[in-house]
Image (cartoon, helix red, strand yellow):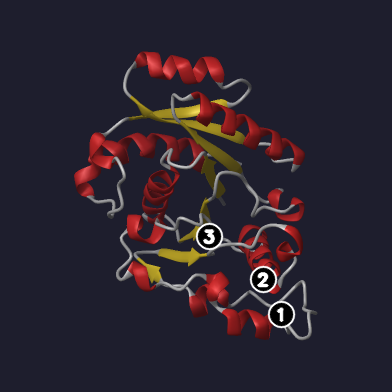
């Protein structure tokens, strides 16, 4: 069983890596791919047909209000979510795609039916489901509560040879420690030479690096679907997948 969260600074390639991992794992097992990044592109990267028509969970207001029994400012904190993946989320080539949508932030807006529903669903996916779970996270791990984080097999932080990316990785690693997540790794992306690899190794302190992915100008601002034309990228990520697949 593998529950893997992919995170890192914005623009480092989280979605591309999450998409390729989902595709690779789907050749062996059923996969649930969770798009928890507000800039949602995971479905398109995997190649879901009509990905732009997939409705984010957070926008299913009628469903959320019904399940949370929302009325006059009061709502259930543990709504029923067990049937959500099969009833409301599309499946394509052995991958079930769940687009979480945007969680509310700031002040009392954090305490709302939408966030309660999403957090309950995330907890269900991590703790109760048997599929491989690949989560494309925002620049952090805010969608993981203290109660569900213990069910994550690994958090993989995507970093590039850039000080801002390294600093973000350090902050995420500290959050993981606070949540008692034991397995935290780094994936070096957009490296062009050995100096880039050395820069990441020298500056990522205390985080095991699973591997490096070479920079490819064809993937700059990439928004299309992964295909067999991307064989070099796929092969590089397959080596990382082999390490993640062996986690126990």
Marked residue nearer the N-terminal end (1 or 3):
1
The residues bearing labels 1 and 3 have C-alpha atoms spaced at a distance of 26 Å
Q: Nearer the viewer, mark 1 or mark 3?
A: 1
Marked residue nearer the N-terminal end (1 or 2):
1
The percent position of residue 243, horizontal first and vertical second, equals 48, 35
**Residue appearing at x 50%, y 77% in the figure:** 88
The percent position of residue 128, horizontal first and vertical second, equals 65, 63
- Using the image as rendered, state which of residue 64 and residue 21 is in the foreground: 64
Residue at the disc numbered 2:
117
Q: Answer with left or right where residue 214 lies relative to residue 182.
A: left
Q: Answer with left or right where residue 146 lies relative to residue 231.
A: right
Residue at the disc numbered 3:
131
User: Tag 2, which secondary structure?
Assistant: helix
Within 10 Å of disc 3 (Cα), the crowding (few <14, some 14-19, many 20+) is many
**Residue appearing at x 49%, y 42% in the figure:** 245
- Using the image as rendered, state which of residue 222 and residue 104 is in the foreground: 104
Residue at the disc numbered 1:
68
The percent position of residue 73, horizontal first and vertical second, equals 78, 79
Marks 1 and 2 close (CB-CB < 8 Å): yes
The residues bearing labels 3 and 2 have C-alpha atoms spaced at a distance of 21 Å
Residue 247 in view: no
- Using the image as rendered, state which of residue 203 and residue 186 is in the foreground: 203
Within 10 Å of disc 2 (Cα), the crowding (few <14, some 14-19, many 20+) is many
């Amino acid at each position: 069983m593998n529950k893997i969260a992919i995170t890192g600074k914005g623009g480092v390639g989280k979605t591309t890596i999450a998409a390729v991992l989902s595709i690779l794992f789907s050749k062996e097992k059923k996969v649930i791919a969770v798009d928890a990044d507000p800039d949602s592109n995971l479905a398109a990267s995997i190649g879901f047909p009509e990905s732009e028509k997939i409705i984010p969970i957070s926008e299913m207001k009628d469903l959320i209000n019904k399940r949370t029994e929302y009325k006059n400012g009061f709502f259930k904190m543990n709504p029923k979510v067990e049937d959500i993946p099969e009833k409301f989320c599309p499946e394509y080539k052995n991958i079930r795609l769940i687009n979480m949508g945007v969680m509310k932030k700031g002040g009392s807006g954090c305490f709302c039916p939408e966030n309660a529903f999403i957090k309950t669903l995330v907890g269900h996916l991590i703790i109760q489901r048997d599929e491989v779970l690949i989560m494309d996270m925002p620049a952090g791990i805010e969608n993981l509560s203290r109660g569900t984080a213990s069910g994550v097999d690994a958090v993989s932080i995507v970093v590039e040879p850039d000080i801002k990316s390294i600093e973000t990785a350090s902050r995420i690693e500290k959050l993981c420690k606070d949540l008692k997540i034991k397995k935290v790794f780094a994936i070096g992306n957009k490296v062009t030479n050995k100096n880039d690899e050395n820069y990441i190794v020298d500056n990522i302190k205390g985080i095991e690096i699973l591997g490096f992915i070479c920079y490819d100008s064809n993937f700059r601002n990439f928004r299309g679907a992964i295909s067999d034309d991307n064989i070099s990228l796929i092969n590089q990520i397959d080596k990382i997948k082999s390490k993640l697949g062996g986690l126990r």
